[in-house]
Image (tube, helix red, strand yellow):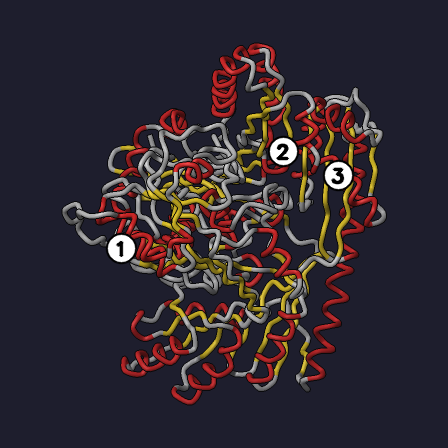
């Protein structure tokens, strides 16, 4: 249900709200509170508009827990000259084409005056705890570092160098009570004083923020530092000035001012940079970062490009025999190459990629980037005569446990990163179903999500910095690598989801979070699809955000039961798998609530896992869908439309009509909580009748997605297969914007040609 609460439009079941850009976050949150929801951005200053917050990519009080506002921008209405256009999409997953809605934050792109913004929402926390701790700032910062490492439900760790630390926790009351005691115990070990937190505990920091934001930019210092460097730099600032020094110890943010001596400002900035610090723009928009200034193309170089390419990689890692090239001629989709590539190069470093790109530029070679080849949209299918650059050898992983970051090469397999993080007690949430094969570079290129994205977000939400190689071979690094509030973070977000058409992403810095301590899965069986979808909407509007909320339709259930014979009812029309994770007390409560919502929603049968074995059994049905479907037809075309949660049932019913029209079985499963559906068309590639109907059937599914207000892709990308629908999905004006961006990064259109943009 969509509710108009002037001047806001709120859709609780889809966790979305639209607001005028001139509104304040406080006004929007007042309206959202009636539905138990919030935009988790609470500015430290009053009266700041949503447009101003987006321009700064501000995070406010809760940067530690919720990050900057850019993570929540789903769509924007832009006034451009005399035309008004909407960028982004109405769903929780990606928009179609380039990531313009996210790139707005921090002024990664400037497209015109922002008139309206649509945000992804979060439930209001059930309880909060505010504690003020007094003592020497060195000990306060040491305590803060310990609390972050402990994996508590921290919302904020605001500090002032005068000797104050504000600790705010949020979550289930039982968890908050227990963790508040843990904070008190830890503070006692440091011999710090815990004071009774007044209801106006944030007033001190709000006053500091008001004063700080009023200073001229050249008289204040706004930085983000690695947390381990914060104590040393705070000490340096205290020795250099008597100005207020304050910030967020959890994020590593620091604000100092007034500093009337410009030489002192420059000196402190240099010291911060030496410690790994980066500029932060919480209180003022960064300068619009310049798009890359590429070297002008030279005349085509004569000579043998293969010899030059081999000089970079060595003969072992340059593939050019036709039989071997054929292996790289396809990805996991049905897209067909236009011909064999010239060669496949397998570099081991960013420097080697840059050298290969310079050779490709000199010879005007098209370049196609490839990871594991697990893509389902034809994004890695080569152009005839192109240079394919495979990044699988770039598989280095460095986990920074203190900073809760991972520095990874583009060739790292997603599941390997997840396992590496878990060995340090940390968690990398994005979990595409191809995670055991797909690589981080491919995940970033398509902004992959997976079942857990409902609660935790998609790949873009974890990207803090990218290293990339541009079309001319120059190397760039976008993003601050710390908090996502630097001057080039918008450009990093622009590359996410660009499918190799703007640059080759070679390395990334990814945010990690504490590993959930418990998990519990609930399965619910329904007699009809409409009831199951209504239950999804009721769950989403209840204030619960499951870690996963998966839907399987009746055809999928029957196929899985034929394959596994685990007692699933063949006459059921829908099944929901719901995962709760987090602190044990919260998981127990959420699992019970999900089971109750399923019962009251009309489920015929509800089962809650009680053991690890139960857990594995319940998810087994979801994991074996692919082999189960192969028993119906040997081949399948898997799509991933994304539609508003409120229209899932309508969309699935219309897809069933498409199935009947074209005489091809279509099964539907997917991530119901965010509307990301995976209609799979089953066919036999040996049957000419099936093949003649296949693509018209797929086109009909795309048309249904757009007609119900959805997008062409949730996480698979556009590639070549969905490219013909881009104009219908976006319109000429938005295509023109994306083409202009493409021209700035790749004027000769050599990067992944024929993909994404029509």
Percent position (x, y) of residue 33?
61, 47
Quadrant in which the N terminus is drawn = top right
Q: Look at mark 3 in the image and give the residue it sits on.
A: 620
Which residue is tagged 1?
Answer: 290
Residue 268: x %, y % from top left: 36, 80
First in sequence, mark 1 or 3: give its number.
Answer: 1
Mark 2 touches mark 1? (CB < 8 Å): no
Instruction: For marks 2 and 3, give the CA distance.
Output: 15 Å
Q: Nearer the viewer, residue 674 or 741?
A: 741
Q: Which mark is residue 373?
A: none
Residue 720 spot, x, y in % from top left: 41, 31
Q: Locate the C terminus and report the quarter of the image it occupies.
A: top left
User: Would you say residue 691 is visible in this rendering?
Assistant: yes
- Mark 2, residue position: 670
Label 2 sits on a secondary structure element that is strand
Q: Residue at x 34, y 43 (%)?
A: 387
Q: Is residue 367 above or below residue 511?
A: above
Closer to the eye: label 2 or 1? 2
Farthest residue toward the bottom? 239
Q: Identify the residue at the far left of this view.
A: 299
Where residue 30 sits in the image (x, y, percent)? 56, 48
Label located before the other in sequence (2 or 3): 3
Tag 1 secondary structure: loop
User: Is the residue 249 above or below the residue 668 in the image?
Assistant: below
Q: Mark 1: few, some, or many residues within 10 Å (few <14, many ≥20)? A: few
Q: Earlier in the sequence, mark 2 or mark 1?
A: 1
């Amino acid at each position: 249900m969509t509710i108009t609460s002037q001047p806001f439009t709120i859709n609780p079941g889809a966790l979305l709200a639209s607001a005028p850009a001139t509104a304040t976050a406080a006004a929007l949150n007042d309206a959202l509170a009636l539905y138990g929801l919030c935009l988790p951005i609470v500015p430290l200053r009053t009266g700041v508009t949503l447009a101003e917050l987006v321009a700064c990519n501000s995070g406010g009080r809760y940067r530690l827990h919720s990050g900057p506002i850019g993570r929540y921008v789903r769509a924007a209405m832009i006034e451009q000259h005399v035309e008004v256009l909407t960028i982004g999409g109405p769903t929780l997953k990606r928009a179609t084409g380039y990531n313009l809605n996210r790139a707005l934050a921090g002024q990664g792109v400037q497209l015109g005056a922002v008139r309206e913004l649509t945000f992804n929402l979060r439930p209001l926390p059930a309880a909060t705890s505010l504690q003020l701790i007094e003592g020497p700032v060195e000990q306060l910062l040491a305590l803060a570092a310990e609390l972050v490492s402990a994996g508590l439900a921290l919302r904020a760790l605001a500090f002032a160098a005068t000797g104050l630390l504000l600790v705010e926790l949020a979550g289930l009351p039982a968890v908050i009570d227990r963790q508040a005691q843990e904070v008190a115990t830890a503070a006692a070990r440091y011999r710090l004083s815990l004071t009774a937190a007044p209801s106006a505990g944030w007033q001190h920091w709000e006053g500091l923020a008001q004063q700080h934001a009023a200073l001229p930019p050249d008289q204040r210092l706004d930085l983000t530092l690695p947390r381990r460097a914060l104590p040393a730099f705070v000490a340096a600032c205290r020795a250099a000035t008597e100005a207020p020094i304050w910030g967020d110890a959890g994020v590593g943010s620091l604000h100092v001012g007034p500093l009337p001596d410009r030489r002192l400002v420059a000196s402190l900035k240099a010291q911060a940079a030496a410690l790994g610090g980066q500029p932060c723009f919480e209180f003022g928009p960064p300068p619009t970062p310049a798009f890359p200034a590429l070297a002008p193309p030279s005349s085509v170089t004569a000579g043998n490009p293969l010899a030059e390419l081999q000089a970079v990689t060595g003969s072992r890692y340059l593939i050019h025999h036709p039989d071997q090239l054929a292996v790289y001629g396809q990805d996991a989709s049905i897209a067909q190459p236009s011909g064999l590539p010239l060669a496949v190069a397998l570099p081991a470093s960013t420097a080697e990629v840059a050298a290969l790109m310079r050779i490709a530029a000199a010879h005007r070679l098209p370049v196609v980037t490839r990871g594991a080849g697990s893509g389902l949209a034809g994004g890695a299918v080569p152009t005839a005569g192109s240079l394919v650059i495979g990044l699988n050898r770039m598989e280095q992983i460095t986990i920074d446990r203190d900073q809760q970051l991972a520095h990874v090469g583009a060739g790292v397999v997603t599941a390997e990163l997840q396992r590496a993080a878990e060995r340090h007690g940390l968690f990398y949430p994005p979990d595409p179903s191809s995670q055991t094969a797909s690589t981080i570079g491919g995940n970033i290129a398509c902004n992959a999500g997976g079942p857990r994205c409902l609660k935790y977000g998609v790949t873009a939400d974890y990207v803090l910095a990218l290293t990339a190689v541009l079309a001319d071979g120059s190397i760039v690094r976008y993003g601050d690598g710390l908090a996502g509030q630097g001057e080039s973070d918008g450009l990093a977000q622009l590359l996410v989801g660009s499918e190799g058409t703007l640059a080759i992403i070679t390395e990334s810095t990814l945010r990690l979070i504490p590993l959930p301590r418990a998990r519990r899965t609930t399965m619910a069986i329904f007699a009809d699809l409409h009831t199951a979808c209504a239950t999804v909407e009721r769950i989403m509007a209840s204030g619960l955000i499951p870690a996963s909320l998966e839907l399987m339709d009746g055809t999928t259930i029957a196929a899985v039961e034929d394959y596994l014979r685990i007692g699933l009812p063949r006459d059921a029309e829908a099944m929901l798998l719901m995962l709760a994770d987090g602190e044990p007390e919260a998981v127990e409560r959420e699992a019970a609530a999900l089971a109750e919502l399923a019962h009251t929603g009309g489920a015929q049968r509800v089962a809650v896992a009680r053991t690890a074995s139960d857990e594995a059994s319940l998810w087994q049905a979801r994991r074996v869908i692919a082999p189960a479907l192969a028993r119906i037809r040997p081949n399948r075309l898997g799509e991933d439309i994304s539609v508003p949660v409120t229209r899932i049932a309508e969309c699935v019913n219309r897809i069933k009509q498409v199935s009947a029209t074209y005489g091809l079985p279509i099964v539907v499963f997917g991530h119901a909580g965010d509307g990301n559906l995976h209609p799979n068309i089953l066919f036999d590639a040996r049957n000419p009748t099936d093949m003649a109907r296949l693509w018209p059937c797929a086109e009909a599914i795309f048309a249904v997605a757009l007609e119900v207000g959805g997008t062409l892709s949730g996480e698979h990308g556009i590639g070549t297969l969905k490219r013909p629908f881009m104009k219908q999905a976006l319109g000429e004006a938005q295509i023109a914007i994306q083409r202009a961006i493409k021209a700035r990064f790749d004027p000769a259109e050599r990067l992944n040609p024929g993909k994404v943009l029509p």
